Image (cartoon, rainbow, N blue to C red):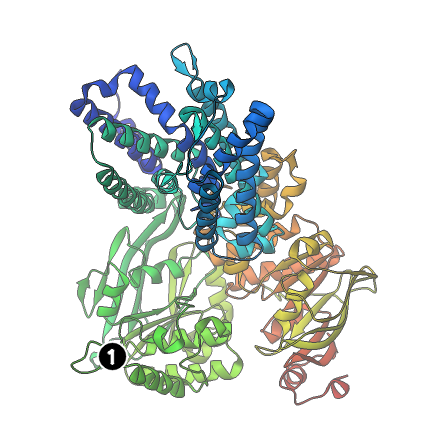
Amino acid sequence: MAISRSESRGAGARLRQFISTNFRLLALLGIILALIVLFTFIAPNFLSFKNAMNIVGQIATLAFVAIGMTFVILTGGIDLSVGSSLALAGVAAALAVPVGGSLLGFLAAIGTSCLVGLINGLMIGKARVSPFMATLAMMALARGLTIAITDGKAITVIDPVFNWLAQGMVGPMPVVLFTLIPVYLLWHMVLTRHVLGRYTYAVGGNELASRASGLSTGRVIATVYTMAGFFVGIGSIVTVGRLTSAQPLAGLGLEFEVITAVVLGGTSLAGGEGDILGTILGVCIVGILTNGLGLIDIVPFWQYVVKGIMILAAVLIDQFSRSLEARSRSPREARVRSQVLSPAAPAPRAVGGASNAGGARTLVMEGISKAFPGVQALNNVNFDVHGGEVHAMVGENGAGKSTLIKILGGVYQKDSGRILIDGNEVDISNPHSAQNHGISIIHQEFSLVSGLDVGKNIFLGKEPRIPILPLVNWRKVYAETKNLFERLGVNIDPKASVASLTVGQQQMVEIAKALNSNAWVIVMDEPTSALTDSEKATLFGIIRQLREKGVGIVYITHRMAEIFEIADRVTVLRDGQYVGTRAVSETNESEIIQMMVGRELGDIFKREPAPVAEEVLRVEHLTRYGAFRDISFSVRRGEVLGLAGLMGAGRTEVVRCIFGLDRPDEGRILINGREVHITSPREAIAAGIGLVPEDRRREGFVPLMSVQQNLALPSLPEMNRAGWVDRQKEESLAVRYISGLNIKTPHTRQRVMNLSGGNQQKVVLGKWLARNPRLLILDEPTRGIDVGAKAEIHALIERLAKQGLAILLISSELPEIMGVCDRIIVLHEGEVTGEFTRDEATQEKIMRAATGTESLSAAS
């Protein structure tokens, strides 16, 4: 039967998808095949069965130790002590065998290496010593003890069980092979299906979010390092049996080979990504390479050189495979999918509404399309901005705003379309190219280096030099940084560390950094999301100055009032498509919202007063020195209590203490009338408390994990059987909350990092609702959320309150906190300065209390 052209194209597309998805594994298999061919050509006896079994024997120790190292690196750690630990464990076994036989020797080896691993884990997980320094110290200590105990001499071990495990044969196959296969299968299952594996990925992917989800991250790290020690102990048994002695220098350089194998196998040194299958292939490559180089009698020096080259190759393969995955959809495929997703979508019309009068510069984006795995982010979108105007861009989360801007900034590459500046097509292939074309981007996610001070961040890559000398003129850096802040009207020390600044101050640094680039187009993505009213007023003054000087401003916001206050035109995107452009003077809020969501939104604040019910939370005289003092309030079932105040008032610090992320110095916390001592998020969760944090990217979710895994993370203790994750329950939970919260994702396995900000926030909400908490703390739950998603979250808050959930809400938007809350507590400089019922509250009263101009007694 003839194969149709469409079937042939479909098969080709599936093949390309398979190759891009499995590129790393295919590349590793290709390397193995290439090495086999190479060494067979150079050394003909390399391909013999006997040599193949010899390779298995040679890599046995490496293979066992690599399992533990995979888990360690997945947590974002490293273990440099494995070689020294293996030697010490071997000596312990050699001393134990004459006393108690094989069994005692096994226990001595494994016990010694587990102890070394446990000490590493406690130093790293509990004492917070860096993995490099902790294991480097242990490497020296263990090796020193080994040499001291043996006096630098080998200890002979004549034990039939040790020898049989390392050198024995079952027919033509070595015994160790029959041990390795089930061990690798078991630990592959542990990594993919057991809670330990899930926690390992979570800690490596985002340790802060893992802790905030109830994981005892220190315990997970200690467990993983102890487990790594266990596999070192197994490796030491094999080594002693193979050499029939315990050598004081055994395992010298083993850590180098193990890390090489694990990294080659695709486990990321940053943590959170990798698997056992890749490690197996990495071990095979190292084993084949070592054996082959030995057969052709190459000196050890060159073996190290070759292995170093292999590590570099591993890194390059990693980078290439990630870029290939990001480009897994061709422009042609993207266009086909966009037609399928939106068959009735109207052709985008030209963006209009402003003329290029007076010779002002123009930037035009035409027909821009972009697809990610499972998501059509942009479909034939048009947008333009002229010098001397503020052009607002709005749309629901997931509408494509940030993606379009990242294409303009060179962060993403478009699948189709073109970008024109002053009528000439330009290629913006990277952020440096965007800057060269006069485009500066202030992303919603901060792009600051926390380890550097403010001035160094602002001038990063553009440092002024001292004439003649190749030195940076730091005096000029800090002086010009100070001038920038004076223009902005803010008081920030140019020499202050970025890590010490508040979120609002960091946002002002981002704005100063953009102003320092002298760009003619500045894109601001939610620039006021963390600013106070005075900071926002200052920013708007700067924007007006820039507009008068001919700078074009692209202003992305979810706040309707800001559009009408600062913008000249507004363009609306919906579901990755262009909807329309309006002159701000010729439209209104209702029309813009209807364009954004495709429907009209009624009054979003329809809360009815909460009935009197029992108290869920009571805080009495809570104090944390330097943050807040003598805070007292209560929340009842079905009540929404708001915490209002300006930035730095102490609102977030209070709820962090309630949730166990920080510890108070004084005061009491009572749940359902009973005092509780909460020292960790795990204890807070056990008390029925959930927290949606202020910074969802930092503490809300694990970006490399899927939607399903993030939703289930706090519930895993109840969603497993003897430690094995119940996948059916997990998937059922994910489907329920994806549907119930309207999370826009192509499937439950989509990584959360690929979702829009609003959908990421819904994932964070969902993981706590799945716990059925008594008290839900919402810290800025609608920050960076579009009006449609805001309405959904407000409706959700109302529904949860009606169901009897106690809710503690922090918001910087006064209309929100007045419309949603039953009562409002106002903080100023860490103290309660006002308390109002819903009927009593006015914006003026709240602001007077928030600025400290009205006392608590006056407010009440």
Looking at the picture, how far across and down is residue 859, in whole percent?
A: 74, 85
Q: Quadrant of the N terminus?
A: top left
Q: Nearer the viewer, residue 724 or 315?
A: 315
Question: Up-down: is 75 above or below 231?
Answer: below
Other-residue count near label 1 (Cα within 10 Å), few / some / many at <14 / 14–19 / ≥20: some
Looking at the picture, how far across and down is residue 835, in whole percent?
A: 74, 78
Q: Residue furthest front?
A: 151
To which quarter of the image does residue 243 belong?
top left
Q: Nearer the viewer, residue 460 or 766?
A: 460
Q: Which residue is mark 1?
A: 464
Looking at the picture, how far across and down is residue 73, in whole percent?
A: 44, 45
| Amino acid at circle 1 | Pro
Question: Up-down: is 331 above or below 89?
Answer: below
> At 35% across and 48% down in the image, what residue appears?
371
To which quarter of the image does residue 133 belong?
bottom left
In the figure, is residue 462 to the left or right of 398?
Answer: left
Question: Up-down: is 651 above or below 691?
Answer: below
Q: Secondary structure at mark 1?
A: loop
> At 74% across and 84% down in the image, what residue appears?
856
In the figure, is residue 704 to the left or right of 347?
Answer: right
To which quarter of the image does residue 295 belong?
top left
Evaluate whether residue 414 shows in this view.
yes
In the figure, is residue 228 to the left or right of 407?
Answer: right
Q: Nearer the viewer, residue 687 or 818?
A: 687
Evaluate whether residue 708 shows in this view.
no
* Number of numbered markers: 1
Q: Nearer the viewer, residue 817 or 118?
A: 118
> At 37% across and 23% down in the image, what residue appears?
56
Q: Quadrant of the C terminus?
A: bottom right
Question: Up-down: is 332 above or below 566?
Answer: above
Looking at the picture, how far across and down is residue 227, in whole percent?
A: 54, 39
